[in-house]
Image (cartoon, rainbow, N blue to C red):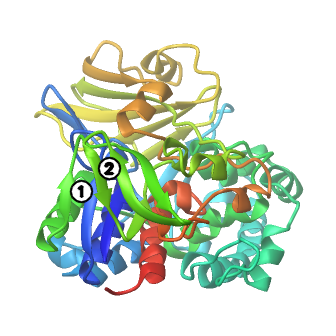
Amino acid sequence: MDVVVVGGGLGGLASAARLAKLGHAVTVLEAAGGLGGALAPVHQDGFSWDGGPTSTLLPAALRDLFRKSGRPLETELGSDLEPLEIIREHRFVDLTSVALPGGSSAAQAAAFDQLGKGLGDRWLRHVDIYEDVWDILRKEYVERPWDPRPGAAEPVPRDLAKLFDIRETMHRRLRADFRDERQALVAGYPLVAAGQDLRNVPSWLGVTAYLEQRFGAWLVPGGFARLLELLEARLATRGVTVRTATPATDLVVRSGRVAAVRTDEGEIAADAVVVAIDPRRLPALAPLVQRTMPAIPPVLTHVGVEGEMPELPHELVIHADPMLVVRRGLTAPDGATALTIQGRGKVAEDLVTALSRHKIDLRERAVTRVDLTPRELVQQWNGSPMGVLWQGRRTVRDRLGPATPIDGVYVAGSHGAPGAGVPFVAQSAALVAQLIGPA
């Protein structure tokens, strides 16, 4: 079959690699001048930074992608993925902090016990709730394509439907489980960082705490810029046609089935189309997702700093208003450091200035910086990589993916996955490949 993939971010590239390996003739259309989306690095004055995420949960999703489309990931990298002993450090307004380890319940309990007696056990009880949740999600949602439409060939399984019908929000779950506000901030952080309001998020999405405790988090040597290089090479090996600076303007649908993708340069015939961008950007799909909204990216500042830096973890979260997240960049000149600062909440001042109020003062030593507003990030990435904004439990049925009501049209990427982030986005491509099948 001739398959057109709309969007050259992780979801689009992963879909193209898998489908080409299955024998399809694949064309990727990307609106920007290059591939990668949020994976693409930022370069300036000898410094470079990851444009989007820096670590990943569940590396099995990436490993499966490379194994199912060619040589294994570690073989391509020339090294193993790097496990993070400390996933992130959380600092609070009372000047206390907790360094959250990954992959060990005992280590996490010990870390919280340093904040107060009994807090470790309370944390473990909260995380244990999600063991059964993950078992259902993994079997029925992450690894198996389903379709919420009435009469669909792949209807929602019973256990999954019961999970989706839970009325409890993440906000209420955290209030019930934690008397110490600091633990609630740690548990809610992954969702808040993704632009979500915990009052509108189903409590089952707190499963990230279980995944971090059970499996840990990992770094790709060379950053996600390196992963992008490997994916581009994989597409070339598989004979995928890549057309950058070629935005798709709509889908051509005849008798309820997709026939082509429309661009400013003309129509491209297609037996199947994988939409790996926000479906709102295509008029044929926009009415189907009119009840959804995108989650908005953070305010972002990439900064290059001269001189010695205090010892910082891979990721530092400062729980204040605004909430600040500091991550290490990719490369820097000798004697300098690349950092990325992310802001969420009431961002009323420059992020470097806001950071200085927390005793990390970069103002006099910053030699270069790239400041990006949420609007600029959406324009740069041609959409939000944060995926769909949760507006209550109905959101899971309001979004599209991996199937759609239009025959031959599928959705991958953060807007077609249960959450933002590398593992969910990479796995969304696997679900699409299952539905399309071999040529």
Which SS class for mark 1? helix
Amino acid type of the residue tagged 2 in the rendering: Leu
Residue 193 is situated, as x and y percent measured from the top left of the image, at 57, 43
Task: Please name the residue shown 58% across and 14% down the image.
Answer: 348
Q: Name the residue under label 2.
A: 39
- Residue closest to the eye, 114 or 183: 183
Q: Can residue 130 be seen in this view?
A: yes
Evaluate if marks 1 and 2 touch, with contact meaning CB atoms under 8 Å apart.
yes
Looking at the rendered structure, the secondary structure element under dot 2 is helix
Mark 1 = which residue? 228
Where is residue 363? Give x, y as percent. Answer: 35, 14
Disc 1 to disc 2, C-alpha distance: 7 Å
x then y, percent, for residue 172:
86, 52
Q: In which quarter of the image is residue 92?
A: top right
User: In terms of sequence position, does the residue under pointer 1 or pointer 2 come before the other?
Assistant: 2
In the image, what residue occupies the spot 56% across and 52% down?
A: 285
Q: Is residue 189 left or right of residue 216?
A: right
Q: In this view, does 90 lie above or below 212?
A: above
Q: What residue type is labelled 1?
A: Leu
